[in-house]
Amino acid sequence: MQMKLNLFLRIAISLMIIPFIPNMAHGLDTASTTKQPLVIIFSQPNPKLPKNTYVDMAVVMDQALKNSGEFRSLPYSQKLSEVRNAVQQGKLSALDITPPLTLDTMQKIAHALGADLLLSISAHYVDKGIKSSVLLERSVGLQDWSSVFLLHLTPAKTDTKANLLDMMNGLKDDILQRMALQPAPAASTIPPPSQPVTVNPPAQPNTTPSASATSTGTTTPEASSSMQAYQMLIEQARKTGDIANLIVSLRRAINLKPTDPTLRRELIKAYEERGWTEKAKNEAERAVALSPKSAALHQLLGDTYADESNNELALKEYQTAVALDPKDGNLLVSLADMEMKMGDNVQALKDYQQAAASDPNNPLPHSKLAIFYFQTGDYGNAGKELLSAKALLPPNDNTTLQSDIADILQKSDSILTDIILNIQQAHKNFMDGFATRETAFQKITAIKQNTIDLNGFLQNLPNSSLQDAVAQYSLAASLLSQSTEEMLDYLQTNRKEASDQSELLRLEAANQITTAENALKADLSKLEPAASSAAASS
């Protein structure tokens, strides 16, 4: 099988006629450049498929790219003089260049060789034809790479030898056509296209922006028009879920507005959706380096550190953000959230309160205060803050309120479970002689009051689509309140029937907590389609 594939491959290379692709100018346009973009081609077998079915597409694609007149290309090999030189210069290690190559090592090699584009192909002849995975990435500065497209192709099943050549040609043409439809490489290498796909922004100005425009983040009228075009591309990619092209379009837009925190945030989110957490962090660090006085960008960097559980660095960035804009309630909330996570509840409460005072029209600090008070058992203040948050929300914003109530109900699980354990422990301590009857009575009385307060808070929650779940949690609290009543009766009268009834009520409450959890999941599942529909329409 392998000998036949190699024979067909040699035939393909010797007979293939590569046509010039005229519409390439609409995508990776290099006509206006003095240097064509360099594509490094990696072709290697898929480790999950038999090696004897591997089809090496490197030479085929090399000829196709060169004959198109649009690219310089270089098929990767360990034996390349460029690769050996990079190893000697310390840019690469022997391990870096040893197959099988990972995406990280391919990116490292492509960077060391000065490539503008990275083309990775894994092709195998299977029962349905040539099955291939094709990845195209572009350099976006420093050592960062951005995906342009990722394809998984399986042509229709064919059995004749001649059709293997056709399939190789078909795969080659498909890759070239898709490259033709993509935006141009980064502006530092090739100017933006005059006619990108779908949207037609005006040509970029030939003059360099003034120092004042660059320093303040303003743009020329031409750049402003281009920004509108890129925003359309970004929106289109976002709606279709095309993360690869979303990243490309965001990078292009950021070239025009390098200190825009909204664009940076979207790019970081896109990186995270692709699982590129390191790229997300690097992007945030670069954003702060470009605009160190931007509170929003420091918050963004803090968020990336928090996602990595690097709490100390996250706390530092949030503190810097608050110092730059001390009246922004969202920044203070981020700081307080991290302080809570690190166990500094005293400082967290102060910052939540400061956020509410500094940003009085922002409902978020009040929501956070409601949850803080709820967790600490201060149900009176928790209810007041939740109503304050609701009053500040737009009239049709039910999603935020439902999210807050869902958070409170989820935390109710642990609070109610703790109440059960506390009743049991107080009873055990009395029975084992570690607590006097009076001490046990005082302990159970305190637990009873806490349970009554919790139930009152749950019953007075604002109306929402989670009413069934709220009722189920309230019932669990009511059962525990009855359990404490029976336990107090036992401590006063020493009636075993009261002790047994208290235990039965606790068991029933435990089952009710499970019922409440299921009710909450059911309520939330009903809301998900509506939330998705609302998000799509917006």
Image: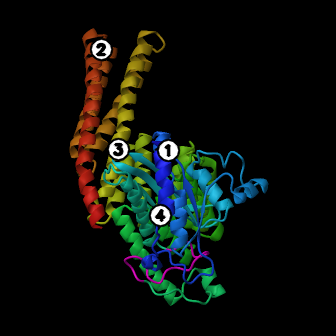
Residue at 64 percent of width and 55 percent of height: 108
Kind of element beneath mark 1:
helix
Left or right side of 250 for 232: left
Q: Which residue is mark 4?
A: 15
Q: Quadrant of residue 21 in the image? A: bottom left
Residue 239 against residue 517 in the figure, above or below: below
**Spatial distance from mark 2 to mark 4, Cα to Cα?**
92 Å
Magenta segment boundaries in residue numbering: 184-200
Mark found first going from the N terminus, 2 or 1? 1
- Image quadrant assignment for residue 415: top left
Q: Tell me which amino acid carries mark 3.
A: Asp
Q: Residue furthest right?
A: 88
Q: Secondary structure at mark 3?
A: loop
Task: Kindly identify which numbered label has been placed on residue 499.
Answer: 2
Label 4 and label 1: CA atoms lie apart by 18 Å
The residue wearing badge 1 is 3
Mark 4 or 1, nearer chain start: 1
Q: Is residue 93 shown in magenta?
A: no
Give the residue type at disc 1: Met
Tell me the quadrant of the picture where the N terminus can be found.
top left
Label 3 crowd (10 A; few <14 / some 14-19 / many >=20): few
Front-lying residue, 445 or 208: 208
Q: Quadrant of the C terminus?
A: bottom left
What distance separates the C-alpha of mark 3 from that of mark 4?
25 Å
User: Is residue 485 at all visible to an observer of this figure?
Assistant: no
- Whichever of labels 2 and 4 marks the residue nearer the N terminus, that label is 4
Circles 2 and 1: CB atoms closer than 8 Å: no
User: What residue is rendered at 46% in x and 40% in y?
Assistant: 48
Q: Earlier in the sequence, mark 3 or mark 1?
A: 1
Question: Disc number at residue 127?
Answer: 3
